[in-house]
Image (tube, rainbow, N blue to C red):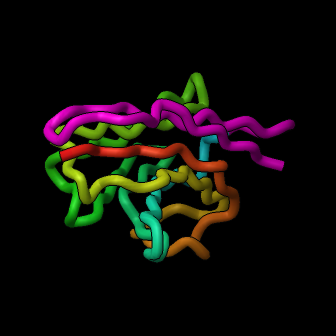
Amino acid sequence: QVQLVESGGGLVQAGGSLRLSCSCAASGRTFSSGGMGWFRQAPGKEREFVALIGWNGGATFYADTVTGRFTISRDNAKNTVYLQMNSLKPEDTAVYYCAARTRYFSGSYVYPPDYDYWGQGTQVTVSS
């Protein structure tokens, strides 16, 4: 069983920054393979991909809407993944979820079914 806990959400003005964290815990395993993704879901909209990172090697991939503004990173020793969000816009307002893929990780996994475990989400609100 894998448990994911997000933190770091909040209210920020447009142009501001937030850093989200996703702490990963699993009995009897370490996160040396697979990878993590960040998704978001705004009211009335489908859950959409934001960014991903592999645990082994750290390859990253971003949605076009956040490229150049958001940065995903990981700390393998802490089993934690981060999402640094800069130059935030009102359209970034959503619940942000982290997700874990424990299978092979060698491509661009941008759909929710590509992931095996999910956190509970953290609200990010950007005011104009």
**Residue 31, x across and y down, in percent:** 64, 41
Count of picture labels: 0
Left or right of residue 2, residue 34 in this image: left
Residue at 46% x, 67% y: name it: 43
Left or right of residue 8, residue 64 in this image: left
Residue at 42% x, 69% y: name it: 48
User: Which residue range is magenta in the image?
Assistant: 1-30
Residue at 25% x, 44% y: name it: 127
Left or right of residue 117, residue 63 in this image: left
Task: Tell me if residue 82 is in the magenta stretch.
Answer: no
Tell me if residue 125 comes above or below residue 8 in the rendering. Answer: below
Left or right of residue 25, residue 17 in this image: left
Tell me if residue 13 comes above or below residue 45 in the rendering. Answer: above
**Residue 46, x across and y down, in percent:** 47, 76
Considering depth in this image, is 24 or 56 the residue closer to the camera? 24
**Residue 116, x across and y down, in percent:** 68, 63
Considering depth in this image, is 5 or 61 the residue closer to the camera? 5
Q: Single out the residue that lies furthest toward the top.
A: 77
Give the quarter of the image for residue 30.
top right
Residue at 48% x, 45% y: name it: 123
Give the quarter of the image for residue 45.
bottom left
**Residue 105, x across and y down, in percent:** 52, 62
Q: Single out the residue that lies furthest toward the front.
A: 128
**Main secondary structure type of the part rendered in magenta:** strand
Tell me if residue 38 comes above or below residue 22 in the rendering. Answer: below
